[in-house]
């Protein structure tokens, strides 16, 4: 990579041409990123190999744009302007594109159908899936809303994004295992919230079991839900696939810039 010259002119080696002042400003930001504490002008100048006056001018320019900040005459730290830039990038990320490799990996490792759902106004909506390669397979219908009280994805939606089921909405019976008691459902949702994932055993379809985990965005809000589902006869214990599901949800949370991935790890044994 090209290195900045002392005279500030454009230079190049084997890579593209670079502007020395821009390269130095980026070097300053990188030094502040890796530092666990703020850094002063002289220390920053030494680290990037320029004199203090040059470093001071660069820092003043970055400070005016909100890229760095400091209290009074104290050390410099990264500024909130970077958060705004990061948010713009993260807002453009395609959750489906980011999740697709994870869905494939989940299916390959578990042998069961993997799903990606996103929060809707009232229900979570399935937007992508990778079907099991087995001869007997539980198929996920794209665009199909999850039933909040009778699916693993729906319970995650209630626990982390949707709030309680409105009192005017009937808890429809699908099988003899469907939870139709509101107190019982509230208890179940609190359990989901505490352990960080949801399971169902034949609650919407008598022969289908499932497990699902939340994915969070940068602000800590529910951004998506990863799930695995399969025939009850084969997926007798959904928690057998819990580690890979939680790892996938944590990976997607990190890809979205989310900061709650620790929730997945803390409950990985639960």
Image: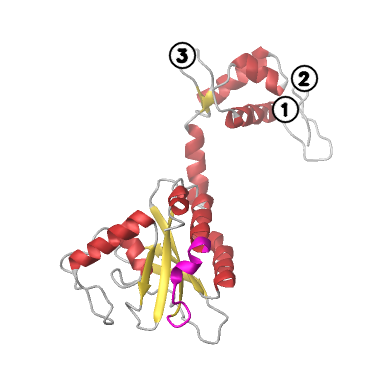
Label of residue 94 in the image: none
Query: Which residue shows up at 77% across the image and 19% down it?
Result: 7
Q: Earlier in the sequence, mark 1 or mark 3?
A: 1
Structural distance between the alpha carbons of marks 1 and 3: 28 Å
In the rendered image, residue 26, in percent from the top left (x then y), is placed at: 64, 31
Residue 110 against residue 80 in the figure, above or below: below
Q: Are marks 1 and 3 in contact (CB under 8 Å)?
A: no
Residue 98 occupies which quadrant of the picture?
bottom right
Q: Earlier in the sequence, mark 1 or mark 2?
A: 2
Residue 141 occupies which quadrant of the picture?
bottom left
Horizontal side of residue 242 vs 186, given as left or right: right
Q: Are marks 1 and 2 in contact (CB under 8 Å)?
A: yes
Task: Give the number of the mark in front: 3 or 2.
Answer: 3
Which residue in the protein does label 2 denote?
A: 7
Which residue in the protein does label 1 denote?
A: 20
Disc 1 residue crowd, few under 14, some 14–19, many 20+, Cα 10 Å = some
Quadrant containing the N terminus is: top right
Q: Which residues are magenta?
A: 232-244
Residue 12 against residue 37 in the figure, above or below: below
Q: Is residue 234 found inside the magenta-colored segment of the image?
A: yes
Structural distance between the alpha carbons of marks 1 and 2: 9 Å
At numbered mark 1, what does the secondary structure look like: helix, strand or loop? helix
Horizontal side of residue 131 vs 208, given as left or right: right
Q: Is residue 85 found inside the magenta-colored segment of the image?
A: no
Query: Which residue shows up at 26% across the image and 58% down it?
Result: 163
Residue 77 against residue 190 in the figure, above or below: above
In the rendered image, residue 209, in percent from the top left (x then y), is placed at: 40, 76
Task: Give the number of the mark in front: 1 or 3.
Answer: 3
Disc 3 residue crowd, few under 14, some 14–19, many 20+, Cα 10 Å = few
Structural distance between the alpha carbons of marks 3 and 2: 31 Å
Which residue in the protein does label 3 denote?
A: 72
Q: Which residue reaches farthest right?
A: 14
């Amino acid at each position: 990579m090209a290195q900045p010259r002392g005279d500030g002119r454009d230079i190049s080696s084997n890579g593209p041409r670079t502007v020395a002042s821009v390269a130095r400003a980026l070097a300053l930001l990188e030094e502040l990123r890796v530092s666990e504490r703020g850094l002063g002008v002289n220390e920053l100048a030494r680290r990037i190999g320029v004199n203090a006056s040059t470093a001071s001018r660069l820092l003043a320019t970055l400070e005016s744009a909100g890229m760095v900040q400091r209290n009074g005459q104290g050390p410099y730290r990264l500024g909130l302007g970077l958060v705004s830039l990061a948010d713009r990038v993260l807002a453009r990320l395609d959750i489906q594109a980011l999740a697709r490799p994870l869905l494939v990996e989940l299916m390959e490792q578990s042998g069961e159908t993997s799903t990606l759902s996103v929060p809707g106004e009232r229900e979570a909506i399935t937007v992508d899936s990778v079907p099991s390669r087995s001869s007997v397979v539980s198929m996920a219908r794209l665009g199909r809303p999850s039933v909040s009280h009778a699916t693993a994805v729906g319970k995650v939606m209630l626990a982390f994004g949707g709030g309680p089921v409105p009192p005017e909405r009937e808890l429809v019976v699908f099988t003899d295992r469907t939870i139709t008691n509101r107190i019982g459902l509230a208890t179940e949702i609190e359990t989901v919230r505490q352990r960080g994932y949801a399971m169902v055993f034949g609650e919407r379809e008598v022969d289908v079991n499932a497990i699902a985990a939340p994915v969070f965005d940068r602000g800590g809000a529910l951004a998506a839900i990863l799930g695995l589902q399969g025939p009850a006869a084969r997926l007798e214990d959904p928690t057998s696939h819990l580690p890979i599901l939680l790892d996938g949800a944590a990976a997607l949370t990190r890809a979205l810039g989310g900061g709650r991935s620790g929730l997945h790890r803390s409950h990985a044994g639960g």
